[in-house]
Amino acid sequence: MSIRNKILARRTVAALVVALAAIASGCSSGVAHPVDPGPAMDALKTVLDAWKEGKTPDFLKDAAPAIVVQDLEWLSGAKLESYQVEGDGVPADANLEVRVKLNLAAKGKKLQRDAHYLVTTSPALTVFRDMMR
């Protein structure tokens, strides 16, 4: 085999290795666990109903299925009087972004909030309030 043929063979093998590595690393969307909107909305409503019923976020850790919750106003003692989910939410990778109008009572005052929640369904159910919005 000539030197030229050896170089060509090595380049071909190298190109195949690079191509296989690209395929193996995944040419997918990159989302390990895309959100499932139906169960995500169910989890959000379960969380908001629990808050409205006067339960604590920790109550949901022991629910079946367990839900991890983070909402600073809830943790600080605000009472949820009513809520209205706005639309069906927007899938964004592993999260479902959902707008919710909250009617709260806190420290003797009535408050209205336009809240944004990020809900995930896998690997665990989580409902986090996006406090930056």
Image: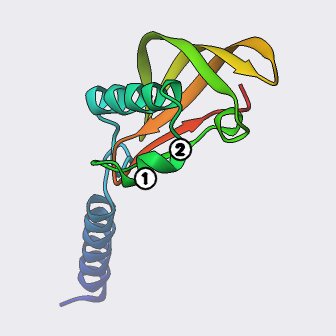
Q: Mark 1, residues whose alpha carbon is within 10 Å: few (<14), some, or many (≥20)?
A: some
Q: Is mark 1 on a helix, strand or loop?
A: helix
Whether tag 2 and tag 1 are in contact, CB under 8 A, the answer is yes
Q: In which quarter of the image is residue 99?
A: top right
Q: Mark 2, residues whose alpha carbon is within 10 Å: few (<14), some, or many (≥20)?
A: some
Residue furthest out toward the left: 1
Query: Residue 2 location in percent, x, y?
Result: 23, 88
Query: Residue 92 location in percent, x, y?
Result: 46, 31
- In the image, which disc is placed on residue 61? 1
Q: What amino acid type is highlighted by mark number 1?
A: Lys
Query: Residue 71 location in percent, x, y?
Result: 63, 37
Q: What amino acid type is highlighted by mark number 2?
A: Pro
**Residue found at x 71% / y 18%:** 105
Residue 63, compared with residue 77, is above or below; it is below
Q: Looking at the figure, which quarter contains the N terminus?
A: bottom left
Q: Is residue 6 left or right of residue 69?
A: left
**Residue found at x 28% / y 72%:** 17
| Nearest to the observer: residue 32 or residue 114 | 114
Q: What element carries label 2?
A: helix
Q: Is residue 15 left or right of residue 50?
A: left
- Counting the numbered discs, the total is 2
Residue assigned mark 2: 57
Color theme of the render: rainbow
**Residue found at x 64% / y 25%:** 79
| Nearest to the observer: residue 25 or residue 1 | 25
Residue 85, compared with residue 48, is above or below; it is above
**Residue found at x 60% / y 24%:** 116
Q: Is residue 84 left or right of residue 41?
A: right
Query: Residue 119 location in percent, x, y?
Result: 45, 36
Q: Looking at the figure, which quarter contains the C terminus?
A: top right
Between marks 2 and 1, how big is the CA–CA gap? 7 Å
